[in-house]
Amino acid sequence: MKRLRPNTLALLLILAMTSPTALAQLSEVERNLASYIDAHHDAAIELLEEVVNINSGTQNFAGVAAVGRIFQARFEALGMSTQWIDGAAWNRSGHLVARSYDAANSGPHLLLIGHLDTVFQSDSLFQRYRYLGDNIASGPGIADMKGGDVIILQALSALNDQDLLESMNVTVYMTGDEESTGPGENQALARADMIAAAVTADIALGFENGDGNPATAIPARRGYASWELKIKGSPAHSSQIFQDEVGAGAIFEIARILNSFYQELAGEKYLTFNPGIIMGGTDLEFDSDESRGKAFGLSNVVSQDAIARGDLRMISTAQTDRARVTMERIVANNLPLTEAEFSLSQGMPPFPDSEGNRRLLGYFSRVSEDLGYGEVTAVDPSRAGAADISYVGDHVDMAIDGMGMGGANDHTVNETGDLESMRVQAQRAAILMYRLVHGGL
Ligand SMILES: [Zn+2]
């Protein structure tokens, strides 16, 4: 039996007066979860301020670990087992994992996803939490996604307060390098353990800020790939261009290819591709790590080299494969005396839509309505970038992302978070987890 403490009762009364019809939809345990989060909302804001004020730009390994230690202590206080996975092998700080495991519970195993790092490095001018009034605060990584991390902690604290956490199978995974995972091989290493955790889980919940609006969540996100085009032409005096022995030159060839990409592929639903840099001429020096370079060429010399690089965003692996076939066909159809080399490498995989994800979104929306917070609808995938949930989507029955803090302007020095949304999302998350594990859906 649950004990109701006097302050809980008082809060329940207040809540009952503010939204009587909504709360009628909640069970007693669910009302207790919601009121715990109300009672601890100010403490959650204090914790948010504390972690936002620790710089944890992805490259600040010590800062990322420091934020990890704060959450680690909090999860341990809930009786969870924790682990810091050192990231030296993939040249990043590391990941925090916290688990609650009960072999006797045959209900679904939940994987909750957060990240400790931000895009604001140690030398950024944006370092401090600042309250702006009207429940809005600014700070580096406040909504993306230290607010989401606090929401995870609040929801689990509420479940623990009701003695429900110890009988749940929950893994919290907070990566230390979501904003900059590193290339190819490092990326596989950096996510291997999280993918292994997903394999043993049934449902994944992502607490990214999504599109910043807590009335939406994300049942599908696009992934990204990067591509590079390298062209060789035959240098000669410009007056001889188009002659059989000179051909078209590298710059015409790269222009043909990019224009054909545009003509044939632009406008396909959920597919975008963007050439972000291009160089051409007689002599190129391109620094691929820095994505910058120098080009030399003369207007009276047929160009010898050209290079372009870009990204590609897709909703499914099948879409990448189709785009690749089209692009490779276009690339192979060379102008006279030119050669083109094209490479496309998958970065973060897509998080494709599925019936399970839509069902989970429906459950989440139902919880929100029962709390009196209204319906939650899907974000258009073309507005949702890639995130860590993308690595696990294929390994679980159901997943949604965007259960984090509302806010605006993330990845800029004007980033803000909506403090009230932290309360709403923590209540929704706690009750959703309770219903998923203990029935009542
Ligand atoms: Zn993020």
Image (cartoon, rainbow, N blue to C red):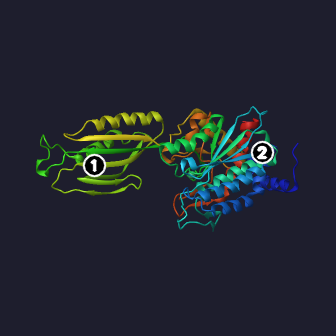
Is residue 380 something one can see in this rendering?
Answer: no
Q: Name the quarter where the N terminus is drawn.
A: top right
Is residue 203 something one can see in this rendering?
Answer: yes
User: Can you give x and y, in whole percent of width and height, for residue 17 in the image?
Assistant: 79, 54
Q: Is residue 186 left or right of residue 52?
A: left
Q: Is residue 351 left or right of residue 257?
A: right
Amino acid type at circle 1 is Ala
User: Can you give x and y, in whole percent of width and height, for residue 187 in the image?
Assistant: 52, 44
Residue picked out by circle 2: 30
Figure quadrant of residue 364: top right
Q: Is residue 284 left or right of residue 372?
A: left
Front position among marks 1 and 2: 1
Figure quadrant of residue 191: top right
Q: Do the CB atoms of the residues marked 1 and 2 lie less than 8 Å apart?
A: no
Q: Is residue 436 above or below residue 301?
A: above
- Secondary structure under tag 2 reads helix
Q: Tag 2 or tag 1, which sits nearer the N-term? A: 2
Q: Residue at x 60, y 37 (%)?
A: 357
Residue picked out by circle 1: 306
